[in-house]
Amino acid sequence: MSDVAKQMIICPHCHRTAYFNIWNSINTKTDPETYGQVRRLSLFRFCCPYCRQTSTINYSFLYHQMESALMIYYIPEDEEADTTQNLLDAVSAGTPKDEKPDSDSGMKEEERALENALAHYKYRIVRTHEEFLEKLAIFDADLDDRIVELAKVIVGAEAERQLSETGFRVKSAFFSFSKEKNEKKLVFRDKNSSQTATVSFDRYVTNVYNRLVDRYRAALEGPHKKDTVINRNWAADILKTETAL
Ligand SMILES: [Zn+2]
């Protein structure tokens, strides 16, 4: 189930107050219209009834896509760090054992089933809408976001080598996916200019991806199985620590 409530917010343009739907949690199964709305970010767009200006309202929420066993916590960068900790605690608590005293064995079986299901869930924490949309794109493309992060580092280094004459240095990278065109690509942003370098998910990138799957399977199914913040720093850490073995 989703958890949505009308809240008074202040229009950033005219500073008058109006009601807006704040989604504390979004469940794409019980509210299928939200599937497209989050991908367009229209769910977070507020159109002021007074001045008619549109603004994106940035607040934390939990995104739940049951059929993919996926939960993404969106926590904007400017929010307190302990919000993250609270959410993580809630995740690791996971099962509803406190709510249901063992009344009968039937309930226990249900709990076990739920526990089992939760063990297969992917939990992620993201801090920006861009990061959130990228995660969705990666999962929509049926890829493993951890491998994609690792691939970004490898392919990015190769892009820097090939573009060394221009002084291109990777500042950040993101994955983009078009379902209609079945087009996957990695886009790299330059540190010192507004230039980008785009690498399509061709045979070279697919090879890198598959090699990384083989190379890091043990680490990702073992000690790093429960990692929730999967980004560039995470990938750099993995590449550094795991190759040292
Ligand atoms: Zn307004």
Image (tube, grey):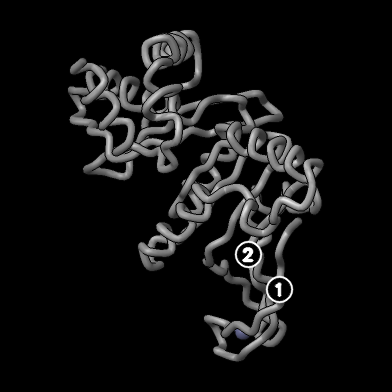
- Tag 2 near tag 1, CB within 8 Å: yes
Residue at coordinates 42% horizontally, 9% vertically from top-left? Answer: 214
> Helix or strand or loop: what does disc 1 sit on?
strand
Identify the residue position indicated by label 2 in the image: 24
Q: How many numbered badges does the structure rendering display?
A: 2
Which residue is nearer to you in this view: 106 or 53? 106
Q: Is residue 202 above or below residue 61?
A: above
Residue shown at the point (46%, 54%) measured from the top left: 89
Q: Amino acid at mark 2?
A: Asn
Q: Secondary structure at mark 2?
A: strand
Mark 1 highlights which residue?
5
Ligand 1 falls in quadrant: bottom right
N-terminal of the pair, mark 2 or mark 1, is 1
Viewer can see residue 182: yes
* Horizontal side, residue 218 vs residue 54: left or right: left
Type of amino acid at the residue the image marks with label 1: Ala
Q: Is residue 123 left or right of residue 227?
A: right
Q: Quadrant of residue 61?
A: bottom right
Q: Is residue 151 visible?
A: no
